[in-house]
Amino acid sequence: MASVPHDHTHGHGHDAAHDHDHHPTGIMRWVTTTNHKDIGTMYMLFSFVMFIAGGIMALGIRAELFQPGLQVVRPELFNQLTTLHGIVMIFGAIMPAFVGFANWMLPLQLGAPDMAFARMNNWSFWLLPPAAILLISSFFVPGGAAAGGWTLYPPLSIQSGIGMDMMIFAVHIMGASSIMGSINIITTILNMRAPGMTLMKMPMFAWTWLITAFLLIATMPVLAGAVTMLLTDRHFGTTFFNAAGGGDPVMFQHIFWFFGHPEVYIIALPAFGVVSQIIPAFSRKPLFGYASMVYATASIAILSFIVWAHHMYTTGLPVAGQLYFMYATMLIAVPTGVKVFNWLATMWRGSITLETPMLFCLGFLFLFTMGGFTGLVLSLTPVDIQLHDTYYVVAHFHYVMVAGALFSAFAAVYYWGPKWTGWMYEEKLGKIHFWWSLIAFNVTFFPQHFLGLAGMPRRIPDYNQQFENWNMISSVGAFAFGLAQVFFIWVVWRMATGKSGIRAAAKPWDGAEGLEWTVPSPAPYHTFETPPVVK
Amino acid sequence: MNATAHQYFRASARAAHSFSWDHVKFEQQHMKARASTIYGRFLSRLGVVAGAPLAAGPAAADWAINLQQPNSAVAQQMYDLHILITIICAVIFCGVFGVMFYSLYAHRKSKGHKAANFHESTTVEVIWTVIPFLILLGMAFPATKAVLDMRDSSAPEMTVKVTGYQWKWGYDYIHEGFGFMSTLSTPLAQIMGQEAKGENYLLEVDNPMVVPVGTKVRVLVTANDVLHAWWVPALGVKQDAIPGFVRDAWFRADRPGIYRGNCAELCGKEHGYMPIVVEVKTKADYDKWLAAEKEKRGLGKAAAAATVIDDKVYTKEELVAHGEQVYQSAGCVGCHQANGKGAGSFPALDGSKLVNGPKDPVIALLLNGKPGTAMASFKHLSDKDLAAVKAYIGASWSNKVTDLAQPIDFTKARNGGQLPAGAQTSAASGSSSGAAPAATAEANSEGAPRQALFRPRQ
Amino acid sequence: MASSSNTNSGHYFVPQPSHWPIVGSIALLTSAFGAVGTMNHFGWGLPVLLSGLGILVFMMFGWFGSVIKESEGRLYGANVDRSFRWSMSWFIFSEVMFFAAFFGALGLARLHVVPDLASIDNKLLWPEFAGTWPTTGPYIDSPFTPMGAWGIPAINTALLLTSGVTLTIAHHALLKNERSKTITWLAATIVLGLVFLGLQVYEYIHAYSDLNLKLTSGIFGSTFFMLTGFHGFHVTVGAIMLAVVMLRLMRGHFDAKHHFAFEAAAWYWHFVDVVWLGLFVVVYMM
Ligand code: HEA
Ligand code: HEA
Ligand code: CUA
Ligand SMILES: [Cu+2]
């Protein structure tokens, strides 16, 4: 979709390594590339394809839940859809999208010629398609895809068939990809900043990614360990998660959520970074409280390691455990609040315009905070006893992940898209996409709070008629939200192919700041081969 | 999706639930006919929104937007805490976004607002760190109190052991010496849309758990195969059922009535179909119920405490006749089909080498299930039921098994080839040969959680 | 942190397009399918798995070959060198976290799960379970003798500690450009590593045949073999890394200034060492 940058027009002095510049062309160019922009583009395309795949599964779920009774899918396929929807969206759509932005933008923002390890960067990306192949093809093996939920809890996941093995190996491969990608990002940020760019002068997006990459390196191996234990429990007779052998199914939950909770901030933090770039640009005012934003982000990351058992209140933790995890979880509201307030203070007395990226950021702010508040409600153990594994939780995490991460990804595409493609999107279409998404999103997910409160469990294909009304509304919203994304494809298509007819200036946003706006749009294939000097 | 409907549901208690291919075809046509009306139904439902959004009366539950009406002190605390926190959050939310919208309105460029250039203030940072912290502290107090109450399961007045199975619940009144299974009773026809759905669609069971009102009931929750969660919203209890572990929770129901909930932890394909129904009775009614239950199981006042086993030798005909019922009611038919031909990944029993072979492997399979497949353990059935179903599958269709198993064979197999120490034979205790002795059933359900799944896998 | 400023002066080496990553991806995809097939007893599983691993080895030769060529071509400046140092450190950190998952499982099992299973709460299910450590758990009835700490494990500890010393001697020699001394001490390190591995194999055989201690021996067997097994695997990888470094030294690669590969392998070796000490204490001694 994104335009193919013009390879050979770059007017820069080659050094020895670049002299034999015989890049492969056609498909092999993309397969073998070591260019961060190519790789960033591929990440984004991949992520969008996965978003559609995961979205289609979500529509399968919503179609079945449109009314009580079994109409569209059978219960086991329903569970497979739920499981794969969760995994595909998190690992296939949201995470790669932000890695794609990091690939494209970090070298530009830091004044680096490329990522620190350009060849490994290629591998980080090209590990994802094999993982996707494993996941998607698992639908077609005997017994079907993994159906134990994206959380893969044993013993159910030990009981299930080949699809679970494929899921486990896919998780291993995606984990390897994430770890390599994160090492690359950390190294790039720590070692490849332009002269004069101190850590505390970095764009916020770089900061959030630095911290996110740390979270990834710290937690992905733990997930790898957890699924490895699942695998050996499944096939080699170990009893990590089996009481008969002195193990415990709940042990998996502890290990999983030690990964899983930081994971949700892995999703959220880069989104915070994007928002922290965009709000100042459209408020024409520098980010308020830069330093405290950095500290807040770091606090969120650190706290995220010590709150995991708030997903396990109903497992029968000791009372002291329930209380400790409740307090620790509640505490996360403080640094997150600091971020929200700083964003508001950035807008305060600015000179605000509401172009599409800004609209999506405001949508993010509004709805993410709402999701944060429902998270806070869930963090209270006694309330969570009622709400755990209900649609209230589903509503909570879609507010933070769809209206949070996904909306900020849309914002990033509108904000940086002109830099990538050299063309502006059409403002009117962008705004339609925003309002359409905003409304459809709320129609889909707001009623799910009610469903959860009234007692509808999650991960069920069928329910009592008392839940029918809100489910119908939710399903209609889901299809409308999906259509909005079809519309988005069209908007981006028109931008990427220049059909919008508006050329992008090097700096299309008058309030934007940063090195990325000092290079032409579209950004040349090679940038900053000689580092710029910052102040 | 060419799978047959009955692959997915145990035929449950009623023979009428067993379906065949014809039903599926019927269902498909039926669905086509229905499809055209769905849109209309949706619009008419929306009409309700426009008309009387939150009207009381029967429609109210359909538009429920809050937690269910609590029926215990703990549930009430949860309810109040939720309301309190939601209000606090809503107020903060309105405050914060009031500021944002004001700013969006007042500081617009199009209104000619020029950007200020402040971007730091330690004072405000401290303020908006400390104030939220204090608010959270305020929330933590009632929450802590609720946690402490909720977890105080000391001094229960009665104890029931609750076991999650794929996909049913077992209730053992451990001090009363009996227990039973509780299975979804909604007919498949309702699920498949061939019959109108009843009011308690998917929230009804054959044997509800029964407790007296105003009594502190401790539930010991465990599971037999995978994780489940025992959840009754109105009573404020949700406790994961973990195979191999017993976790406890408690409730004291304020008012008599019937309270419904669902399994709340994904447990496989029928996770949506294992409801929980708790019938809260007045103390007098509860005592009556208890007496009747004991009577039914031959646990009269003088009933022997020792394990009673059924060592009667039944004829093949007796067993096969009873086995046919078991084949229906225990759910074998759901997977292996009425014609014994199986379906999809469910193997045919008709002509099966295993079935037609010696009895011991079949006994082992029925007692232990086959880990990693849908073939679960059927250890919770009585020995007589098991012997009967074994005889039935051995004698039906083209099968001609001669190696008949008696209940006593199962009893022995459960005990590693021996009779349990101190057991009395049914002949000795004089219990009727018809129903499975209740004490055995109890012993079975005690032993039930230690099952195939716990076996190290080969 | 080597942070603040001016870290990116001069040109930074960016490699040419390369087909090795995609070869690696194909290798992992093939291996994954092969492993799934093998574990589910399909005849095609093992051959596919082996060919996947074969492709992976091929990829490593090719990829590392290019890295070595670039390194020897002196394409890596000081800046790239710093990147390598960061990346190796973070990679080792990720490995630490991988082991942390298994140490965590062991700790949780010993301190919480096993006592819990034996506690009054669970008497209903496991009336006879005593909850002593080591254990096969309440249901598996296959008694074993745990591995004593003061036999082979203690010898292995000594071996690995010594190998850390020999490796450091080799490094100091390299810093003084004493190539043959470096090679000798490096060789000694590798030999110590190999002896360690040999003893561990012997220990496993002993465990299986004499002690009845198996992977399937409940939670003790699970954690014991998974922890020591993954450690052994890391020793193997470390030994291969050292061997490659040694071969390169023999071919005249590296000098007192440029030898990051040596250091990376050494860091890795020390990391493996430290993990072993942790293992020795919590798996064998406690
Ligand atoms: C992007 C992802 C993301 C984010 C950012 C969050 C953020 C939070 N989450 Fe969420 N969560 C998920 C993704 C996420 N979550 C997912 C995927 C699950 C389900 C997993 C599964 O089971 O499948 C889940 C589940 C989940 C649970 C378990 C529910 C259950 O299964 O029973 C809990 C319980 O504590 C919880 C809590 C929180 C809290 C307290 C926050 C906090 O970080 C929120 C903090 C933000 C605010 C509070 C708003 C802004 C603050 C202010 C304006 C300051 C003023 C506020 C006050 C003083 C109150 N989450
Ligand atoms: C970031 C992650 C992410 C994202 C973006 C989404 C997006 C969506 N999710 Fe999400 N969801 C999860 C993460 C995510 N989800 C997770 C982790 C779970 C838990 C899984 C588990 O329980 O294990 C979950 C579970 C979950 C459930 C609960 C399932 C259950 O408990 O059984 C539901 C139900 O409504 C749902 C719905 C949706 C919908 C409607 C969208 C929509 O936003 C999707 C919109 C996108 C599209 C629709 C695709 C794009 C458009 C097209 C393909 C064109 C064609 C469309 C039309 C013609 C209409 N999700
Ligand atoms: Cu049982 Cu879900
Ligand atoms: Cu969490």
Image (cartoon, rainbow, N blue to C red):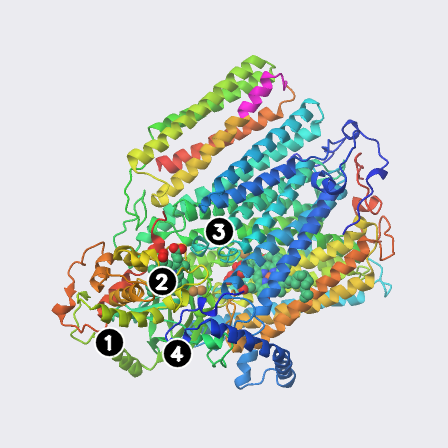
Comparing labels 4 and 2, the label whose residue is closer to the camera: 2
Residue holding disc 2: B350
- Residue at 60 percent across and 26 percent down: it is C261
Tell me residue C245's x, y (percent): 57, 23
Q: Residues within 10 Å of mark 2 (few under 14, many from 20)?
A: many
Residue holding disc 4: B254
| 2 and 1 marks in contact (CB < 8 Å) | no
In the picture, the disc for residue A162 is: 3
| 4 and 2 marks in contact (CB < 8 Å) | no
Element marked by disc 2 = loop
Residue holding disc 1: B294
Q: Which residues are magenta?
A: C242-255
Of the numbered discs 4 and 1, the one sitting upstream in the chain is 4
Residue flagged by tag 4: what amino acid is it? Answer: Asp
Of the numbered discs 2 and 1, the one sitting upstream in the chain is 1
Q: Quadrant of residue A519?
A: top right
Q: CA distance from mark 3 to mark 1?
A: 46 Å
